[in-house]
Amino acid sequence: MITDFFLGRYPFLFIALLLVIGVYGMMMKRNFLKKVIGMTIFQTAIYLFFIQGAKKTGASIPVYSVDLGSASDAYMNPLPHVLVLTAIVVGVAITGVAISLLLVIYRRFGTLDEARILEQMRESA
Amino acid sequence: MMHGIMANAPLYAVLASALAAVAIAFTGEKHRNLRETWTILASLLKFGFIAAMVPGVLAGVRYEVSLVELAPGVSLALRADPTGVLFALSASFLWILTSFYSIGYMRGGKEHKQTRFFAMLAVCLSATVGLALAANLLTFVLFYEILSIATYPLVIHKESEKAYRIGRQYLVYAITAGLVLVAGTALIYQAAGTLDFQGGGFLPPEAGRGVLVTIFLLFFVGFGVKGGVMPLHSWLPAAMIAPTPVSALLHAVAVVKAGVFGFVRLVGFVFGPGLMGKMGLSTVLAGLAAITIVLASFIAMTKDDLKARLAYSTVGHLSYVVLGVALLTPTAMLGGAFHIVTHAAMKITLFFCAGALYVHMHYTKVSELDGVGRRMPITMGAFAVGAVGLAGFPGTGGFLSKLMIVQGAAEGGHTLFMVILLASGLLNAGYLFPVFIRAFFRSSPEHTSYDEASWFMVGPIVVTAALALLLGTMPDAIFHFFGVASEAVSAVVAGGAP
Amino acid sequence: MTSVYDSLFLHTVARAIVPIIQVFAFYIITHGHYSPGGGFQGGVMLAASIILLRISLGEESYGRFPRNAGIVLAGTGALCFAFLGFVPLFLGGSFMDYGLELFWLPSATAHYWGIFLAEVFIGLLVWGSLMAIYDALATGGEE
Amino acid sequence: MSHIPVLIPLSLLVSSLLALLAGLRSPGWGHKISLGGVSASFLFSLAGIRAVLRDGMPLRYALGNWPPPVGIEFVLDSLGAYMTGIITFIGVVVLVYAPRSLARETPGREVYTYPAMLLLLTGLTGISLTGDIFNLYVFLEIAAIAGYALLATGDRAAPVAAFRYLLIGSLGGGFYLLGVAFLYFSAGTLNMADLQARLPDLVENRAVISAAAFMIVGLGVKMALFPLHFWLPDAYTNAPSAAAGLIAPLMTKVAAFAIVRFFLDVFPPSFLTEALPLVSTVGWLSAGGILFGSVMAVAQKDYRRMLAYSSVGQIAYVGLGLGMANPVGMVGGLLHILNHALMKGCLFLIGGSIRYRTGITQIAEMRGLGRLMPWTMAAFVVAALAMIGIPPTAGFFSKWYLILGTLEAGNWWWFGVIILSSLLTAVYFFRTVEMIFREPEEGDPVARIGRKRGAGVTGVGPSPEVQLGLGGATEGEREAPLSMLLPILVMGAAILAAGLLNVAIVNGLLAGAVAHAGG
């Protein structure tokens, strides 16, 4: 009983684990760059969840090929893949903005360590 | 054409001073005489519109104006019904006198920031008349809150640290009162589905005792704060820090009367005498009013500062109106309603005298007044008339309204309240007579020659004293005050549209 | 940040590879609409080639691809894509409906060319934006 | 087939790109194009409102002519038109206000600020219009990214605050995306109308329940719902005034609107109240948020931080309106979106013009501003009265509907919360009003400026402004410049107008949409 619970759903458990790791990275790590890495892990876990959802056993990649014909169960569900494509672009944009913010922070505070930055902010406030 | 203008006369009455306030603000300090003419013009215009409505109202015509719809089924509507016109008439007439008086007072005392003073005074008056002529509870609350906010700059006029502290206290009371009223109005809207005033009340008894009692409590606090009913009165004596014209007009006629007028509306046109009596709320209200009358009079005796004494006397006399209305018998309600007018005339005279004493002789304490009667006979004579009126001597307005309240109490079988009313007459004499006795019958070296304050101030004093006397002897002579009051009470008793 | 890693070996290799990468990227863009690939992947490869130039050649690379070339490229790419969407709008179809019969093109070929142009403009857009991100980072984000 | 639904976000998108390219060459053009774009979008949304009111039917627009369940569909219904109207109006006002304020606070960066502002507005209008839940995620992130960029250009600590907002915001976006995934894999469609048809028989499905939970939490983060609000105060305090004036009134409101959209148009009405009591949890969290926001605002010394905490409190009113789940409460919450957008926008712009003219941000230093900037302070009083809920202003009427909603829901705690929070709001606003209208003492910044009547004020030469005679004569350069003062006065007038016309707004746009709420 336990085994089929794992067998059937191990990818989803793996994704849940990734989500937790991502959130842990974002919340607990003191270095801002590590927080960004945590964020990307979190986002990637979500993309995996989409892809995992689209999987059909025995289906090929959702690109039309003559010999497979047009049977719907011959191909994996293409829509989550397209959604993930857009989500990846959004993820790139967010990470791009995050890193450029870090750059300005590094230039102004000389460090990326949250504790020391907060200290400097309190002193200057 | 005549009917055209009269149709929305209530609207013009409200707008007259609101537009004047804008004009005053724009003319500013540089050309003061023009600014003063705005005030006087607006007060005359306002009084003119309201007085023009009186004959129609007596004949049963109801001038109604409905502007924009504020909430589903409730619109910003003004209706000139007898109760509203009664209050608006007294407030606007006395505003004319106060305008002249305050010009003399402000220029005499060389006060600063006069533009703000006159502009805010005009806004207060437009809110007061709007409140008086409101056709439904939402419009009433709307003008009620505008009035509280517009009074704030007048209370802190001196801009001393003490003034700001008192201003804060005033605001806490005023904003709480406003919020509590809004809450009560929402409850009523929920229970009754409408907010339009209805003679004899429109609250359905089947709304449940719990809801009705909560509504009463909310409105008691809301109106009690402004109406100076104990224990909610403490902001009133403190607000005496405002210049005297403000204390005279606002804290004797407009603002505090708005609270008491609210009680009249509450008992007469929201709950209705029947429901109030059945639920026993009226006895609670009457009890609190009686306590306020007695306590306020005792405290007044201890106050050496003249304005503080008059403030506590106002707290006491406001509860006369509340008591009169809470006794639920028609004569008592008539007495209460009429007391609004008579008390306004008498109390404003006393405040004007106090102002004249302050500006002219810089006296604020009662103990300083020895023998001042010789120097300022007219002022102190008017003070005597006012004091006598408040104590309820025959021949003055005060006597008439107090008599009716006592008769009402007798009809209602409330012997305890009758005793309190009669005793309060003596108490009033206790704290008011020593003032002019000291002024006339004590001699003092420096007050020998005749030297009155400027005519701008003494004129209004004489007029208000004369009004107090006239209201006693011929109540219906000037502007049919008495007629409008009795019309108002009959509207409550008869039910139907107010 | 833009220190040039000036070994001769890197210069020659970079100069040789970059054109090949770009040609392959163009292939991916142009064949995107019916085989794996498309605007995004092609654009990223083009940006990668420029970043390789930036890293290897440093200042020289600013000659042909000036500092805010990225922003301009991204801007024009996005504008062209929006314009592609507007054409059917003006012709009465709904926004982005490039399958509409143009004056002489039947719907199918219009659709074909529409998606092709879309892929090319997206390629431009991704190329410009990634290059802009790199330039912003490379300049150290001084005020 | 009217193109209005797509033209509203599109005109903003295209003008932001044009402004970017033009801005690189000359900043002046950048501002002109962006202002043109926003005004065009504002006209389109007005036309949209008129169209929706006239034929009572939502305008449906299939992008790329793909039929709805497959393609992305824009739906301009009464709620959508209401929201786009607010967003574009605030956009026009802030863009008229922005140039001088930005020139003073973030010199040299206008080239990127205007396109970012327009992208923000594109995202927000997109959220209000889209009928596709994934497309809503894309617009949500477009608005968020533009928001991070705008907030980061503020004072010294702004990038840190923007970074923290970025982290939490992307976490929220991620949760929302997870919710979309769950919904898609259980219902099989992304289109809202299609979802509404399919969800009633999926109500017990655990995936749908977890989807709703994820989405509400995700949007709750974006909406700064009480426990998830801690990014907001720092972000709004350090932001440049023009950016704060644009973000504060709109971003959290549109997220709250998205939740309302899900409650009304996607999930079956009884689902969020019985199956999964999300609506009442949102309501109770909002009640906590109202009190928390008001209490914290009283404790603040910095003007912008006070407004930020007050925003946390006020957005919770919208949450409370949703929490009541009855038509009257919902109308109150939705009307508060408009009222608060006007009030908060006006207050932040006033903060900007104070900072522009005197550099003051602390309330204690504001003594005597009433004399220096009479018109701006008059608008401040109107906005303050509206925030407290004094009748003629708009603030009162949304509170009125909310109170009626609590009575109908029979929830006395929320009734008390609304009353208490209005009192707290009165405390911290009147404290500021009193400070503003007092006479400046020696050593106050305003006193120093007063003395330098002739010299240019804080470096700005006496610009040929209109001499505004209110009370004593005040030289032009003491009052805020006209291009900053006019938007503030327009907002003040809009507050009063929204108050008096609220019934027209409610009957026209809101009542219809909320009629079937309350399950």
Image (cartoon, coloured by chain):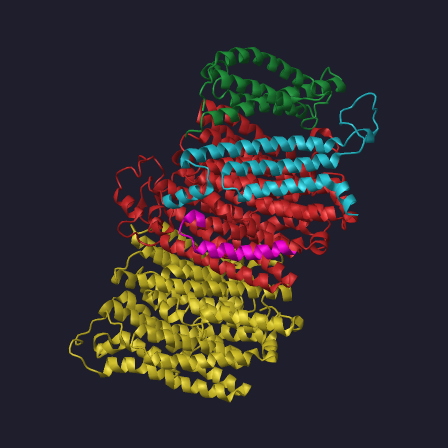
Chain D image colour: red
Q: Toward which corner of the image does residue B274 lie, by quadrant?
A: bottom right
Confirm whether the magenta stretch covers residue D38.
Answer: no
Chain C image colour: green
Confirm whether the magenta stretch covers residue D290.
Answer: yes
Q: Nearer the viewer, residue B437 or B38?
A: B437
**Quarter of the figure with the C terminus of chain D:** bottom right
Q: Which residues are magenta?
A: D280-305
Chain in yellow in the render: B
Q: In the image, residue B34 lies at what x, y percent?
A: 32, 53
Q: In the image, residue B241 lies at what x, y percent?
A: 33, 66
Residue at point 70%, 36% (across, down): A50
Q: Is residue D262 left or right of residue B409?
A: right
- Relative to B357, say whether D133 is above or below: above
Q: Is residue D393 left or right of residue A5?
A: left
Q: Is residue B306 visible?
A: yes
Residue farthest toward the left in the current orientation of the protein = B445
Tell me the chief SS of the magenta region: helix
Chain A image colour: cyan
Q: Is residue D48 visible?
A: no
Q: In the image, residue B316 lies at what x, y percent?
A: 41, 78
Q: In the image, residue A49 lies at what x, y percent?
A: 69, 38
